[in-house]
Each structure stands twice: as structure tokens, then as C-alpha cells.
């Protein structure tokens, strides 16, 4: 790391402290008429409030926008697990476009790396982690088929049809996949069965299919009892695809059913089939939270994915270094050729959209800051022109030019910091909000995700730093003009 | 980083460079009004213009603030208005897309193209699309350097029938017909957008070999025969669909088995339909049992299809529409309110004198409102006008959303700017104008005395 890179990596609050230090030092060592300046701010409170409000808006927006980017970064960070290796088809840029043949998967779990990424021999061969299940050792190798499904959304009559993309992941053994990804289920749920489907016994009336017994929903929000007891009832069984999903996915699909989120036991439609929710995954903070998991064979058949799209392996060591070593070994030696990379690296590459948002946010913040600076310059120039005589008196009383400069600069900085503080407070409201976005590596594909906005100390410090910079930039030119006034001319 | 600061500095520079133009308008109008004898109305305007010219520093700072805020809002609205336009259902130039019913990306057998064409051609006269109103899309992506794949050396092709590309593709009417004909005649030909050419470091006339990342083992050599018109397709590339289809056939001949994607190579089928009724007919025919079942397909309007892709961005669009744009408007109003209220405070004596001279309170109110409106409207117009010219000249706003790589500022921005600047100025000036209206002559003169 170069000294410049080290400096750039410093947390924002350190920069804020560094930026505030000269002002505090000037206040301590210099005899600045600060009380005079502060009194002026309260006397002209309307102007102070109006100027500070434009800072509040700029900083408030900045905090909210940064919270969004922070949420996306946390999501990608939380999605890859150290020690996991993701295997894709050779040449594939995304899970969506990857297609591994079944033969690829057969032997991959037995692979062992004997050298590290640079070709140096390892003290012991490195392979896939194994755990004991019912007295039988099983390899932590998650065989997966990832699909994006186009799902119609319910619309009110007269509205154009709407669709959304739903992420579905078919896994061969949910228990193994859960262990590989470090995911478990929330209480009350269960992984789907080995069959992957569940028959639900119900009643049909009079042998007529779809004629239910019980309450009937005529339209959303209006349910009427419907018990045609006179007709004979017969048992029927319907097969539902069992599925587990993340809470974000459950919330998203819950909107269709007009409830906060789907719960275990709820049924939903996807790809012309009825699906039964059997469990909710504890996957908050990862991309898996926006996914539906079901049996791989069913997902493959349902969505025409005849092969696995990806295989995720848990290394025996469970470390980043082990993942790197095994990934390098598989890419180099495994045949037919595959592309393996540490899972964390894969998700780290899905930051193209995030970077794009980050630059857009910086641009918006800078441009709005220019507007805010113009506003505070107006205020400060007006304040100085109205207090020319005061400045003359201060100079006659013995205040040096630099003290006049600092006093007016501080006045501007105080307005900016006040506005910035309120902006940060308002921006903090966004902490915990959820938003839909997309994670993409910029080479096609991408994952629709639901993320949580995160406001942290770094963002607050960034907001305050921008406010301080705006205050200084907006105040320095008027303060210089105040400093240059000659005492006698000013009093005259 | 460098480009970022260059753009920000460029914007500030543009605002500063426009200042002389702004003052030229102010002084030009003053000069004109001074030299015509046109009654009280114009004289009233003259007073407003003179007031704005009195404190040039304050007027300049307010102008810069309005300029940058209007620039920002013009950019945001350009994105929003484009997205609204493409997701709005149209009755004229209605385009429908046939895609795989459930899966994304849609992957249908290429044989579907013929079946769908046959199906729509058998529709009754008046509902039937013409031959030129049908188009297939196949996607072929690859890289020039398989050992080091980067975004720069990657290229994404629309493989299509060159005969209909000019008429069926949106915003491709500007493509030279001879270039489309050349692509038809040269199967290995390709047309690249200007940004893609630059990123690949290639020129028209050169050759390149593309190593595919979606069609494994189908690596193709291309002759770059031309450049796509500037704008929407700056990042994309077009190739003749026959080239891809023959490569798939060759693969089967060489390997004795079909390519894994051979039966999945048709991604989209487009058709332009004469009426909304014909859309319903097509939708019913495509959904008829037994016709298109392996895989089943769906028909949707282009706007509906695009809406689905934009669903992932819905919160972002919401924030732009209901958070960012209003916040900028409020900021702009605050800056104007601040400047005008300072101006009013400084000119209390002048207001009192005007009252003594016979000006009515409502006239004083109008005078102050007018000052705000003048600066708002002129700054807004200059900002949106320059944004329109400069941004579109440099290839639009490069903020990729879904498959739209850049957004252009529409001509409508020419009225957005003055209206926004004017409205923000009006809201910002109301309170200062009211306080100017209520200036008490006796109080002011007693203080002066």
C-alpha cells in the first residue's frame, strides 16, 4: 500500500476530525470574536435558517443516497462466504449463463489441490469439507441450478399487465446447500423433502374441479361464505412444489397476496405451477434473501435448465486462502474445463451497478453543493456588507486581519455544520428502509435484490465533511473581502 | 475520478461562461426599454431589470445556483420522461414481443421464427403485420481476449435480419441503408457502436475474432463494416443472424451432435401490429394449446416487456421522482428566497420611497416577485438550453438503467428549464415580496432620520 492509498483508506470520521482541528485550534489560540458572530447568526435568524436549510437538504439527500450504496455493498459483502468456491462453466460470466454438464459435477467433490495458486506444494492436500450425516460422511458440495423466472403480477382490471423477475435456485440437497452457504431456517419451517413436492388433500364439490368448499374470494378484500352442502363432496389431491425462500422474497410475493409477507404454509403461483412455502431462510443481508429455493430436478424441468448452472464447494479449511487454492486448482486442472473462483470474489465482482450509483451520487452531491455554496456566499456577502462598520470597530479595537477572516469564516462554517447536522439527522431516518435494486457485474446477468439502507458513522462523517467543505468554500471569499477592509474606511 | 472532476468543473465553467450572456440579456432588455416610449408596463419591467443589475455579485451567485439546480433536474427528468415514454402503452406503432413464457433469458428454438411468422401471416387482412414488420433477435456475446476477459474487450451482438433492422429497431432509422445492405451481403460483417469500437480499440475496416461466452466453442471472425448511428447503440453491435445460425449448423456437422444452445437460439421475436385488436388475436393464437408448448411462449407489448426489466429499478426511479427532484426544487427555492429577502432588506428605504411616489403595495409585491421570476426564468432557460445542447452532443447521460446505456435530453427540456426556474423563483419570492409590500413608510423614515 502506498502512503496515498493508506491515506485514502482512512475512515471518514478521521478526515472530519482532521478537518475540524484547525478551526478548533484557531478558536483556542486566536482571540476570535466568536460570540459576536454567533449573536449575529441569532439576530438574523431567518437568513441563517434559510441558508442552513439548503445545507440540510443537500446533506440529508447525500446521507440517504449513501445509505443505499452502503446497503448494496453490505449485501454483496454478506453474500459470499469465506472458504467457498463457486464453479461455473468455462467462459460463463454469470450464473445465469452458465451451463455445467452433470458429468462435471460427478467428480468435482473428490478433487484435491496438492499445490497452491502459485504452484508451490501444499503440506497436505486440500479438498472439499465433509460432514457426518447419519453416520455417513457427505461432501459439502452444493449442486445448483439458478433461473430467473418471469412472473405475472396481479393487476386491477383495466391496468396493463405487469411482470416481475423472480430468482429461483434449484438445489439437489437443501441440507447440504444450507450448510455450504451457512444458511438455516427460521423456526417453524423445514427444508423441502427429497421428493420436492407435497400433495395436499382437499375437497371438491360435486366432482367439479376448482369448486371449493369454504369461503370464496370474489375480488380482493371481499370474501363470502360458500358452502354448497347439498352437493356431494369428494376428496382430491393436488401436488404443490415445496419451496423455501428468503424473507425479502417472501415480502415481495406477499404483496400479491396483500399481506406483509408470505408465511409457511402459504401457496403461490410461479411458472404455471402452485408452490407451497415450507420454510423461510435466515438469509438477511445476502442475495439469497431474495431467492426461492426448490428441488433442483423440478426447477430444471420447469424452467428448461437441463444442467447445473453452478456448483459451490466448501473447502475443508474454510478460509479465503483455501478457497483461492482450490479455485486455482480446479480452473487449471479439472476437465472438462470449468471456471472456479472464490465465492467472495464472485460477489465482489457484482459491484458494477453499485459503482455506477456511487459516482452518480457523488455527482448529484457535488452539483447540489455548488448551489448550496452560492447560497451561503450570498448570505455572507450580505452579512459583511451590512456590518462594514462593525468590522471597522473590531479592527480599531485591535483585532488583526486574520482574526476578522477567521471570525467570518467560522460564521459560515457554523451555519453549514448546523444545516449539515440536521441533514444527517434527517438522513438517519432512512436507516433500515428496504429498497429493490439490481446487482450486476456489468457483463450481462445481474440479480434483483431487496436491500436494507444502512446509515453508519462513516456516512455521517462524510455528510458533515461535505457540509464543512461547503461552509469553508462559501465563506472564504466573503471573509477575505471582510479582512481587506481598512478600519477608517469601514467606520466612515 | 479525473473525468468526474472534469465534468463538475465543466458544469461550473459553463455556468460562469453563461453569466455574460445572462447579463447581456438583462442589459439588452434595459437598453431596449430605455429607448422605447411604451407606457407604464415596460417601465415597471425596467425597474425590475435595474434592481437585478444593481448587485451583480448577488445576481451572479443566484444565477449560478439556479443554473446548476436546473441542470440537475433537467438530467433527472430526462431519464424519467424517457422511462415513462417507453413503458407507456401505445395504440400507434404497436410492437409486440414473443418470448419464452417463464424463463429469462428467453431461449426458444429458431424454428419458432417460421412457425410464428406463419401464424401471424394467416391472420385476417387488416390485422396482419407485413413481412417487414417481423424481426428475430438472437444474442451473441463474446470477448476478444479469452484469457483476460474485461468489460472493455467484451462485445454483445444483436444477431438479426439486416433487411428489417432499420425499420424495426427503435432509433435506427438513421442507419445508412447501404450499410444494412452490406451487412446482408457480407455474412461475416458487423456494425459496432462508436463507444464499443473505441473500447475494443478497433476501426471500421478491421477484422476481429470473438470468443463467445454464451455460445461455447462458437468463436466467430468478423469484418467491421460500419458504425451504428450515435446514441442508443453506442455500446452495442449488430451481426447477420445467418452467420450465427450457420455456425451452429457447422458445429453439428463437426461434432456429430447439436450445440447445447442449438434449440435455444431464438431469444425474441418482434412484430409491429396495425391495431391493438390484432395484438389480442396474436396473443390468443400464441397461447392456443398445442401450438407453442416446448417451450410455451407469451406475447406482450414492448412497453410491458420493458416495464418488467425496470421493476428492479422501481425504488430508484421512485426516489428520483419523489425525493431527489422535489429536494432540488426546494433547494432552488431556498437559495432564491434567501437572495431576494436579503435584497428586500437592503432596499427597505427604496420601497418606502416608491410608496411615497405613489406605488401601491401590490405593485411593490409584483416588483419583487417579478425580479425573482426574471432571474428564475432566464437562468432556467439558459441552463436547460445548454444542458440540451451539451449533454446530447456528448452522447447523453451515461447512466445505464436496464438495457438503456444513455439518456438524451429531450427538446421539451427547453420549456422545463424556464418553467422550473420561474416556479421555484415564484415560491421563493412570495415571502420576501410580502414583507416588501408591508413596509411602513413612517417607520422606515423615522429610522433613517
Image: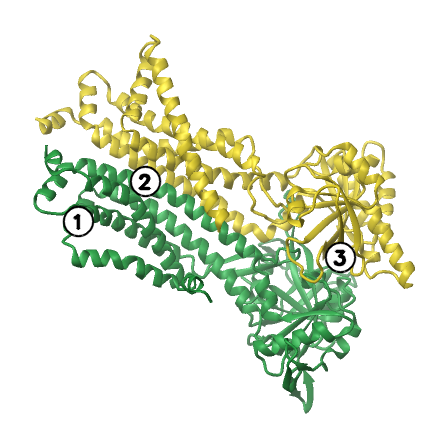
Chain colours: A green, B yellow
> Residue B41, image x and y in percent?
33, 14
Is residue B438 positioned above or below A259 on the image?
Answer: above
Give the residue displayed 66% in from the left and 78% down from the top: A119
SS class, disc 3 = strand
Query: Which residue reaches farthest top?
Result: B37
Residue A184 visible from this viewpoint: no
Q: Name the residue tied to disc 3.
A: B212
Q: Nearer the viewer, mark 2 or mark 3?
A: 3
**3D distance between C-alphas at marks 2 and 1:** 24 Å
Earlier along the polypeptide chain: callout 2 or callout 1? 2
Q: Nearer the viewer, mark 2 or mark 1?
A: 1
> Residue A147, image x and y in percent?
70, 62
**3D distance between C-alphas at marks 1 and 3:** 68 Å
Residue B2 visible from this viewpoint: yes
Q: Name the residue tied to disc 1.
A: A403
Mark carried by residue A375: 2
**3D distance between C-alphas at marks 2 and 3:** 54 Å
> Residue B343, image x and y in percent?
25, 31
Is residue B73 positioned above or below B364 on the image?
Answer: below
Query: Which residue reaches farthest bottom?
Result: A135
Amino acid at each position: 500500500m502506498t502512503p496515498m492509498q493508506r491515506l485514502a483508506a482512512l475512515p471518514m470520521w478521521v478526515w472530519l476530525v482532521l478537518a475540524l482541528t484547525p478551526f478548533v485550534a484557531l478558536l483556542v489560540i486566536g482571540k476570535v470574536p466568536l460570540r459576536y458572530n454567533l449573536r449575529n447568526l441569532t439576530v438574523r435568524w431567518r437568513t441563517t435558517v434559510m441558508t442552513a436549510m439548503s445545507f440540510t437538504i443537500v446533506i440529508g439527500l447525500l446521507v440517504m443516497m449513501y445509505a443505499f450504496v452502503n446497503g448494496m455493498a453490505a449485501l454483496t459483502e454478506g453474500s459470499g462466504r469465506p472458504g467457498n468456491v463457486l464453479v461455473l462453466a468455462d467462459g460463463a460470466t454469470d450464473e445465469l449463463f452458465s451451463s455445467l454438464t452433470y458429468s462435471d459435477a460427478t467428480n468435482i467433490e473428490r478433487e484435491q489441490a496438492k499445490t497452491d495458486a502459485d504452484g508451490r506444494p501444499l503440506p497436505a492436500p486440500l479438498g472439499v469439507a465433509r460432514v457426518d450425516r447419519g453416520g455417513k460422511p457427505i461432501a459439502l458440495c452444493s449442486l445448483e441450478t439458478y433461473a430467473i423466472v418471469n412472473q405475472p403480477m396481479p393487476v386491477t382490471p383495466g391496468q396493463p399487465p405487469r411482470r416481475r423477475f423472480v430468482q429461483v435456485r434449484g438445489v439437489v440437497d437443501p441440507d447440504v446447500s444450507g450448510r455450504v452457504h451457512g444458511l438455516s431456517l427460521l423456526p417453524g419451517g423445514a427444508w423441502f423433502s427429497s421428493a420436492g413436492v407435497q400433495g395436499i388433500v382437499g375437497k371438491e364439490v360435486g366432482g367439479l374441479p376448482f369448486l371449493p368448499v369454504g369461503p370464496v374470494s370474489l375480488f380482493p378484500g371481499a370474501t363470502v361464505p360458500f358452502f354448497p352442502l347439498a352437493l356431494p363432496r369428494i376428496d382430491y389431491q393436488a401436488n404443490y412444489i415445496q419451496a423455501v425462500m428468503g424473507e425479502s422474497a417472501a415480502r415481495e410475493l406477499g404483496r400479491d397476496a396483500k399481506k406483509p409477507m408470505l408465511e409457511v404454509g402459504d401457496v403461490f403461483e410461479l411458472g404455471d405451477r402452485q408452490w407451497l412455502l415450507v420454510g423461510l431462510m435466515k438469509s438477511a443481508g445476502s442475495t439469497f434473501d431474495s431467492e426461492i429455493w426448490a428441488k433442483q430436478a423440478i426447477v430444471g424441468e420447469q424452467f428448461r435448465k437441463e444442467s447445473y448452472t453452478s456448483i459451490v464447494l466448501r473447502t475443508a479449511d474454510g478460509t479465503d486462502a483455501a478457497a483461492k487454492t482450490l479455485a486455482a486448482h480446479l480452473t487449471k486442472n479439472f476437465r472438462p474445463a470449468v471456471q472456479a473462483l472464490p465465492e467472495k470474489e464472485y460477489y465482489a465482482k457484482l459491484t458494477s451497478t453499485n459503482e455506477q450509483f456511487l459516482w452518480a451520487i457523488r455527482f448529484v452531491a457535488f452539483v447540489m453543493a455548488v448551489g448550496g455554496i452560492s447560497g451561503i456566499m450570498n448570505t455572507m456577502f450580505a452579512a459583511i456588507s451590512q456590518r462594514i462598520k462593525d468590522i471597522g470597530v473590531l479592527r480599531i479595537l485591535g483585532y488583526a486581519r486574520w482574526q476578522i477572516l477567521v471570525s467570518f469564516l467560522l460564521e459560515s462554517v457554523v451555519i453549514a455544520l448546523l444545516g449539515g447536522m440536521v441533514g444527517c439527522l434527517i438522513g438517519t431516518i432512512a436507516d433500515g428502509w428496504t429498497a429493490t435494486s439490481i446487482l450486476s457485474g456489468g457483463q450481462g446477468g445481474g440479480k434483483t435484490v431487496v436491500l436494507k439502507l444502512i446509515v453508519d458513522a462513516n456516512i455521517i462523517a462524510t455528510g458533515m465533511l461535505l457540509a464543512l467543505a461547503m461552509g469553508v468554500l462559501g465563506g472564504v471569499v466573503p471573509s477575505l473581502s471582510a479582512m481587506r477592509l481598512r478600519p477608517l474606511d469601514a467606520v466612515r | 475520478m479525473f473525468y468526474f472532476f472534469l465534468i463538475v468543473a465543466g458544469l461550473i465553467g459553463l455556468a460562469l461562461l453563461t453569466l455574460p450572456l445572462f447579463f447581456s440579456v438583462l442589459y439588452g432588455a434595459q437598453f431596449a426599454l430605455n429607448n422605447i416610449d411604451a407606457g407604464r408596463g415596460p417601465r415597471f419591467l425596467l425597474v425590475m431589470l435595474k434592481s437585478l443589475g444593481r448587485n451583480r455579485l448577488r445576481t451572479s451567485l443566484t444565477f449560478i445556483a439556479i443554473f446548476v439546480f436546473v441542470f440537475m433536474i433537467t438530467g433527472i427528468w430526462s431519464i424519467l420522461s424517457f422511462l415513462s415514454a417507453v413503458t407507456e402503452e401505445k395504440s400507434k406503432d404497436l410492437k409486440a414481443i414473443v418470448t419464452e413464457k417463464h424463463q429469462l433469458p428467453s431461449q426458444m428454438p429458431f424454428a419458432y421464427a417460421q412457425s410464428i411468422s406463419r401464424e401471424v401471416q394467416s391472420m385476417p387482412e387488416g390485422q396482419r403485420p407485413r413481412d417487414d414488420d417481423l424481426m428475430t433477435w438472437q444474442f451473441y456475446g463474446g470477448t476478444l481476449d479469452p484469457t483476460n476477459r474485461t468489460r472493455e474487450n467484451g462485445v454483445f451482438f444483436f444477431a438479426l435480419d439486416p433487411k428489417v433492422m432499420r425499420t424495426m429497431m427503435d432509433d435506427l432509422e438513421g442507419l445508412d441503408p447501404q450499410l444494412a445492405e452490406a451487412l446482408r451481403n457480407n455474412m461475416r460483417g458487423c456494425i459496432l457502436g462508436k463507444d464499443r469500437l473505441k473500447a475494443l480499440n478497433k476501426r471500421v475496416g478491421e477484422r476481429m475474432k470473438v470468443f463467445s461466452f454464451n455460445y461455447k466453442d462458437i468463436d466467430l471472425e468478423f469484418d467491421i463494416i460500419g458504425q451504428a448511428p450515435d446514441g442508443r447503440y453506442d455500446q452495442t453491435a449488430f451481426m447477420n443472424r445467418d452467420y450465427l445460425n450457420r455456425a451452429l449448423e457447422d458445429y453439428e456437422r463437426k461434432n456429430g451432435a447439436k450445440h447445447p444452445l442449438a434449440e435455444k437460439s431464438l431469444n425474441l421475436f418482434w412484430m409491429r401490429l396495425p391495431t391493438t385488436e390484432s395484438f389480442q388475436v396474436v396473443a390468443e393464437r400464441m397461447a392456443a394449446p398445442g401450438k407453442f408448448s416446448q417451450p410455451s411462449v407469451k406475447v406482450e407489448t414492448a412497453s410491458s416487456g420493458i416495464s418488467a426489466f425496470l421493476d428492479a429499478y422501481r425504488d430508484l426511479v421512485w426516489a428520483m421522482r419523489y425525493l431527489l427532484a422535489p429536494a432540488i426544487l426546494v433547494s432552488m427555492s431556498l437559495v432564491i428566497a434567501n437572495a431576494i429577502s436579503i435584497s428586500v432588506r437592503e432596499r427597505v428605504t427604496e420601497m418606502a420611497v416608491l410608496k411615497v411616489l405613489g406605488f401601491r403595495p401590490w405593485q411593490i409585491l409584483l416588483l419583487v416577485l417579478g425580479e425573482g421570476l426574471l432571474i428564475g426564468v432566464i437562468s432556467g432557460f439558459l441552463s436547460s438550453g445548454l444542458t440540451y445542447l451539451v449533454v446530447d452532443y456528448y452522447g447523453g447521460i451515461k447512466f445505464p438503467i436496464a438495457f438503456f446505456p444513455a439518456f438524451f435530453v429531450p427538446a421539451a427540456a427547453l420549456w422545463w428549464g424556464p418553467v422550473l426556474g420561474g416556479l421555484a423563483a415564484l415560491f421563493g419570492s412570495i415571502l420576501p415580496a410580502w414583507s416588501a409590500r408591508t413596509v411602513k413608510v413612517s417607520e422606515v423614515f423615522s429610522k433613517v432620520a
